[in-house]
């Protein structure tokens, strides 16, 4: 049976993962300050994106996301391993996106995992390392994804 602390940790981490998705979909880059540690490494490179710290990632997202006319980050099914004040999580992401391509709007889909390392801070759980791991894509414009 889970202790109250374990239940609380799991709920807080699930909330953190949801807050990330909402920050991206709302294009609220400053909200990422409450998701990642200042020295976090965020690695989107497997899908052709940037790898950097929190500040570099916020700048990258502010430049990259306006290229899409619509998107949703649907985070589901997290496997979570908590060890005291650290944790590892692997979360499924289903990500439909829309972007202009050859004069029309093209909808494409990406399936990936977020592979996270987390730490408990005085301000709550934060992600210290996130890596996107590609699983599949469908209908992505030519050259869009590696």
Image (cartoon, grey):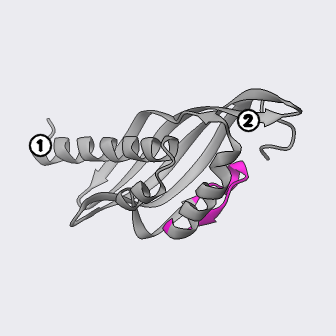
Residue at (59, 64) in percent of width and height:
59
Q: Residues within 10 Å of mark 2 (few under 14, many from 20)?
A: some
Q: Position of residue 136 (x, y in %)?
A: 69, 33
Front residue (pair 12, 90): 12
Residue 105 vs 26, above or below: the answer is above
Residue at coordinates 38% horizontally, 40% vertically from top-left?
18
Q: To which residue does mark 2 refer?
A: 99
Between marks 1 and 2 in the image, the one whose residue lies nearer the viewer? 2
Asked whether 47 falls inside the magenta stretch, the response is yes
With 88 as the anchor, is 86 left or right in this view?
A: left
Q: Nearer the viewer, residue 60 or 3?
A: 60
Q: Is residue 7 left or right of residue 21?
A: left
In the rendered view, tell whether residue 27 sits above or below residue 43. Answer: above
Q: Is residue 15 left or right of residue 74?
A: left
Residue for point 26% across, 43% down: 10
Residue 131 image point, x, y percent: 56, 54
Q: Earlier in the sequence, mark 1 or mark 2?
A: 1
| Residue on which disc 1 sits | 3
Does residue 88 appear left or right of residue 93 in this picture?
Answer: left
Q: Outermost residue toward the bottom?
A: 39
In depth, the one of 13 and 2 nearer the eye is 13
As for residue 9 lying within the magenta part, the answer is no
Residue range (magenta): 43-54
| Residue 102 numbered mark, or none | none
Quarter location, residue 57: bottom right
Cα distance, mark 1 to mark 2? 46 Å
Q: Secondary structure at mark 2?
A: strand
Quadrant, the N terminus: top left
Question: Pointers 1 and 2 in contact (CB under 8 A)?
Answer: no
Label 1: state its secondary structure.
loop
Q: How would you rate the neighbour count of disc 1 (Cα within 10 Å): few for under 14, some for 14-19, many for 20 or more?
A: few
Percent of width and height locating residue 81: 34, 48
């Amino acid at each position: 049976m889970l202790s109250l602390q374990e239940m609380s940790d799991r709920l807080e981490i699930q909330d953190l993962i949801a807050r990330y998705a909402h920050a991206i979909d709302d294009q609220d880059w400053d909200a990422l300050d409450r998701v990642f540690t200042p020295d976090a490494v965020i690695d989107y490179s497997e899908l052709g994106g940037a790898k950097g710290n929190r500040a570099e990632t916020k700048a990258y997202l502010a430049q990259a996301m306006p290229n899409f006319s619509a998107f949703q980050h649907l985070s589901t099914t997290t496997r979570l391993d908590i060890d005291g004040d650290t944790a590892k999580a692997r979360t499924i992401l289903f990500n439909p996106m829309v972007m202009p391509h050859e004069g029309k709007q093209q909808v494409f889909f990406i399936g990936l995992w977020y592979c996270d390392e987390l730490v408990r801070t005085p301000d709550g759980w934060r992600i210290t390392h996130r890596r996107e791991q590609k699983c599949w894509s469908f209908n992505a414009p030519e050259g869009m994804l590696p």
